[in-house]
């Protein structure tokens, strides 16, 4: 297993290109199941999760061709991916694959909509909480599917096809909104999705669906109105920049101090994160090429936040902010309202000298003057990168084990940071 070694203390100066959003690329790949024509995606990040979903989709019979472009070439980054689901060869998504990545469960809606049946493994446990799929199943049932659970699989059937419905989610769920939207575009009649998640990645998927011929109103809002169509065509679509990667590198630069341009980043997707960083005393400016982050000498100020669905502060940046606040000049509080067990990074940050106390869903972070490098363990994707942020400021060497978690969501992390002066290396295991 690979390890990442960081010698802390260097300021970051330079440019970091932001990749395409993992959380948009995955559902965009999945909607190729809805059409026999070719969907061409550009700016697809090169990530382990993308590769895994490729395997899952190929298992359903999708033909996938990938053409790479080097980072920075023509100002573009990421792969170009052509996905063609001329015929669905297999409507089963097996446990061996779905258990490795929860988002692959989202194939359920498109398979049902296109084939009238699907057999998709329940995703199983996860490091950041129980993460049930009850709302996904409720949405499919509302759209006319019959659902049973058999041997750990969701077996769904809609013999006469899906029909439009009024779906109201009890709470905001990104995955359940994707599922309902992906299924409703091919259902007979009209669907209303109320209390839909309005994360930018859902808007990106909806815009791509419209280009494929879907009829969707209310994109980027919490009420989606869909008029079903009988078939969808192909299109070309560029994946939006990754706002979580952006927030992460912004916090890296905020932690070390320096001056970094996050190239291609979209400030409109990061309002809450930018507000919090400014409160912390970091200069954040939206510029033509992206977002510029600067901190020169000013102390980090403590903040008080809670995570919530978009446009509030994202849970996927919670661990990173906590790492940043470990060195603030005072006590910060962070309340996690989305996932019940998303504090796995606390014990690892403590190994570097952080002073953090948990009270239920709230973490109290007392800023310390100094962090000291130590061996730590990555537990989940966002938790792992919080250890990188702390390691960049810690005295001495931090060794992060189990970095496969990082590779799921961060493309060439050590190269991007090294190019700005950080001392980060990878040791192949
Ligand atoms: C997506 C993101 C993930 C992010 C999360 C919240 C992707 C690939 N993943 O995950 O990075 O952290 O949104 O922004 O885009 N819930 C239920 N029943 C359900 C579905 C969800 O109770 O059927 C709960 C979850 O347990 C959680 C909350 O709803 O407490 C929100 O989860 P959800 O938005 O669905 O997260 P994901 O779509 O899995």
Image (cartoon, helix red, strand yellow):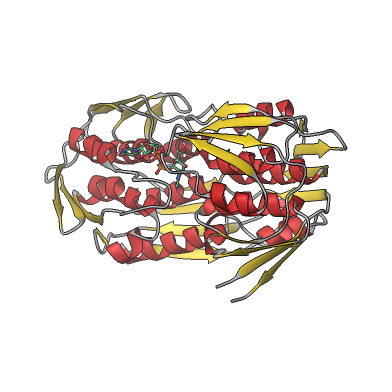
**Figure disc tally:** 0
The part of the image, by quadrant, that contains residue 275 is: top right
- Relative placement, left or right, of 372 versus 214 is right
The residue that appears at 16% across and 59% down in the rendered structure is 151
Give the quarter of the figure containing the C terminus.
bottom right
The residue that appears at 36% across and 35% down in the rendered structure is 177
Residue 389 lies, with reference to residue 291, above or below; the image says below
Q: Residue furthest bottom?
A: 429
User: What x and y, as percent, mark residue 389?
Assistant: 68, 49
- Relative placement, left or right, of 28 versus 313 is left
User: What x and y, as percent, mark residue 311?
Assistant: 53, 27
User: What x and y, as percent, mark residue 35?
Assistant: 35, 50
The residue that appears at 88% across and 37% down in the rendered structure is 297
- Relative placement, left or right, of 243 versus 23 is right
Residue 97 lies, with reference to residue 107, above or below; the image says below
Q: Residue furthest right?
A: 297
User: What x and y, as percent, mark residue 40?
Assistant: 50, 53
Residue 24 lies, with reference to residue 3, above or below; the image says above
Give the quarter of the figure containing the N terminus.
bottom right
Q: Quadrant location of ligand 1?
A: top left
Residue 385 visible in rendering: no
**In terms of depth relative to the viewer, which is nearer, 289 or 399?**
399
**In terms of depth relative to the viewer, which is nearer, 120 or 379?**
379
- Relative placement, left or right, of 190 versus 273 is left
**In terms of depth relative to the viewer, which is nearer, 36 or 383?**
383
């Amino acid at each position: 297993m690979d390890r990442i070694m960081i010698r802390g203390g260097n300021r970051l100066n330079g440019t970091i290109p932001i990749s395409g959003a993992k959380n948009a690329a995955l559902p965009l790949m999945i909607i190729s199941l809805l059409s026999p024509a070719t969907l061409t995606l550009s700016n697809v990040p090169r990530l382990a999760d993308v590769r895994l979903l490729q395997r899952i989709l190929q298992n359903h019979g999708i033909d996938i061709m990938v053409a790479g472009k080097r980072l920075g070439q023509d100002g573009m980054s990421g792969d170009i991916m052509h996905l063609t689901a001329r015929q669905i060869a297999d409507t089963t998504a097996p446990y061996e694959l779905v258990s490795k990545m929860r988002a692959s469960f989202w194939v359920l809606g498109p398979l049902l909509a296109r084939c009238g049946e699907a057999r998709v493994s329940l995703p199983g446990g996860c490091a950041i909480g129980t993460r049930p799929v009850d709302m996904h199943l409720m949405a499919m049932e509302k759209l006319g599917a019959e659902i049973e659970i058999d041997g750990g699989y969701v077996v769904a059937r809609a013999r006469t096809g899906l029909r439009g419905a009024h779906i109201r989610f009890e709470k905001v769920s990104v995955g359940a909104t994707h599922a309902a939207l992906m299924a409703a575009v091919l259902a007979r009649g009209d669907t209303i999705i109320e209390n839909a998640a309005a994360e930018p990645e859902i808007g990106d998927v909806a815009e791509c669906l419209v280009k494929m011929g879907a009829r969707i109103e209310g994109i980027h809002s919490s009420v989606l109105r869909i008029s079903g169509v009988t078939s969808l065509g192909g299109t070309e679509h560029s994946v939006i920049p990754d706002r979580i990667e952006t927030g992460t590198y912004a916090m890296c630069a905020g932690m070390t101090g320096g001056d970094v341009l996050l190239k291609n980043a979209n400030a409109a997707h990061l309002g809450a994160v930018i507000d919090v960083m400014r409160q912390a005393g970091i200069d954040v400016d939206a510029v033509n090429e992206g977002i510029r982050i600067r901190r020169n000498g000013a102390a980090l100020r403590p903040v008080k936040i809670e995570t919530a669905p978009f446009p509030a502060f994202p849970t996927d940046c919670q661990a990173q902010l906590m790492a940043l606040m470990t060195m603030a000049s005072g006590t910060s509080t962070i309340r996690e309202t989305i996932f019940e067990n998303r504090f796995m990074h606390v014990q690892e940050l403590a190994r570097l000298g952080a002073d953090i106390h948990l009270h239920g869903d709230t973490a109290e972070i007392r800023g310390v003057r100094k962090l000291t490098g130590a061996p730590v363990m990555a537990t989940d994707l966002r938790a792992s990168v919080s250890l990188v942020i702390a390691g960049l400021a810690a005295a001495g060497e931090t060794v992060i084990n189990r970095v496969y978690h990082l590779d799921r969501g961060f493309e060439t992390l050590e190269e991007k940071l090294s190019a700005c002066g950080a001392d980060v290396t990878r040791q192949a295991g």
